[in-house]
Image (cartoon, rainbow, N blue to C red):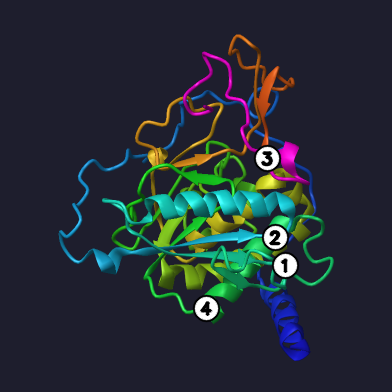
Amino acid sequence: MGCESFFYSLLITISVALITYNILVSSTAPLKPGFPGPGGLAYHPGVISLDPVIKMPADRSKPGEGDRRKRLFHTAVTASDSVYNTWQCRIMYYWFKKFRGQPGSDMGGFTRILHSGKPDQYMDEIPTFIADPLPSGMDQGYIVLNRPWAFVQWLQKANIPEDYILMAEPDHIIVKPIPNLSKDGLGAAFPFFYIEPKKYESTLRKFFPVDKGPITDIDPIGNSPVIIEKASLKKIAPTWMNVSLAMKKDPEADKAFGWVLEMYAYAVASAFHGVGNILYKDFMIQPPWDLEVGKKLIIHYTYGCDYDVKGKLTYGKIGEWRFDKRSYDRSPPPKNLPLPPDGVPESVV
């Protein structure tokens, strides 16, 4: 076991050393850590200036039509063993099971990739793969860097029967059966308005050289939610890991990308291997900015939701009614949480 851990540590070190990108130190306007919205990045709810962004396809095959088994995808969620991650994973897996077998679903198996390096008490409740964390200090306090390294280990060691992977996160709630949206070798991904490759072209060129293609080849995505062919992800994952580590070591990139650094790294790695993505704006909503569930498939509750008693959003100020996942970093949310006031958007309710 010691030899194996040493091997993987050595593998990371060598891989990073082999990255041929020129890392320079300079300053740039930072993408401040925090959450987009009022007081953060400019955001206009419901407006995403991307091309192409397409709606969810209305024409879905009915159960039994064609060989749907060849299109099943495996849902994978990376997590630490913290209380905070654990209650989110339990909720996420509960809703996964609710919709897996319903008409229109291409949802196959499920794996929580636990990057704590040791089992926890929920191994029997949630299908789990144990991954080693990065060697001490390598994440530089940015725990998200464990995510690509965990995927590398899982893809190398696990028996994954499906030909496709859905990369999801603990704070995703599945609200509809999810079909396999990827096709023709392209991934299917949600477009994030704050991933702006063109804006940071000079920084990104250190990791995506000009000879690899135009900067527009880098899609405005993170690694989640993404549905992708397993074979493609096996190629992308090591590059994703290497680029994440290299970006974190680069002062300019670290300052520019902040808390979304690893998302940029995945977008770069996907482009580096020539894997484009179909951008589905209906893949996911993010309350409180997105107001209606509609035909969306996932609710991502990453932002705090604060309202006064009249149902008015008080973002940036603690409301008289609130839900923020960060309020429950040491204990799970209690049962029977009070519903929000009248007038609060459907997505929050």
Give the residue displayed 32% in from the left and 38% down from the top: 55
Cα separation between marks 1 and 4: 17 Å
Which label sits in the foreground, 2 or 3?
3
Q: Secondary structure at mark 2?
A: loop
Instruction: From the top left corner, tell me how far across and down residue 214 is, in percent.
Output: 47, 52
Assess whether mark 4 and mark 1 are in contact (beta carbons under 8 angstroms): no
In the foreground, 234 or 83? 83
Residue 141 visible to an observer of this rendering? yes
Assess whether mark 1 and mark 2 are in contact (beta carbons under 8 angstroms): yes
Mark 2 is surrounded, within 10 Å at the Cα level, by few (under 14), some (14 to 19) or many (20 or more) other residues, namely: many
State which tag comes first along the sequence, 1 or 3.
Answer: 1
Q: Amino acid at mark 3?
A: Pro
- On residue 158, the disc is 4
Cα separation between marks 1 and 3: 23 Å
* Most distant residue in the top direction: 310
- On residue 333, the disc is 3
Q: Magenta residues, as a range?
A: 326-349
Please give the residue where the numbered disc 2 appears in the rendered image: 80
Mark 1 is surrounded, within 10 Å at the Cα level, by few (under 14), some (14 to 19) or many (20 or more) other residues, namely: some
Q: Amino acid at mark 2?
A: Ser
The image quadrant of residue 151 is bottom right
The image quadrant of residue 162 is bottom left
State which tag comes first along the sequence, 2 or 1.
Answer: 2
In the foreground, 40 or 22? 40
Please give the residue where the numbered disc 1 appears in the rendered image: 116
Assess whether mark 3 and mark 1 are in contact (beta carbons under 8 angstroms): no
Q: Is residue 103 left or right of residue 176?
A: left
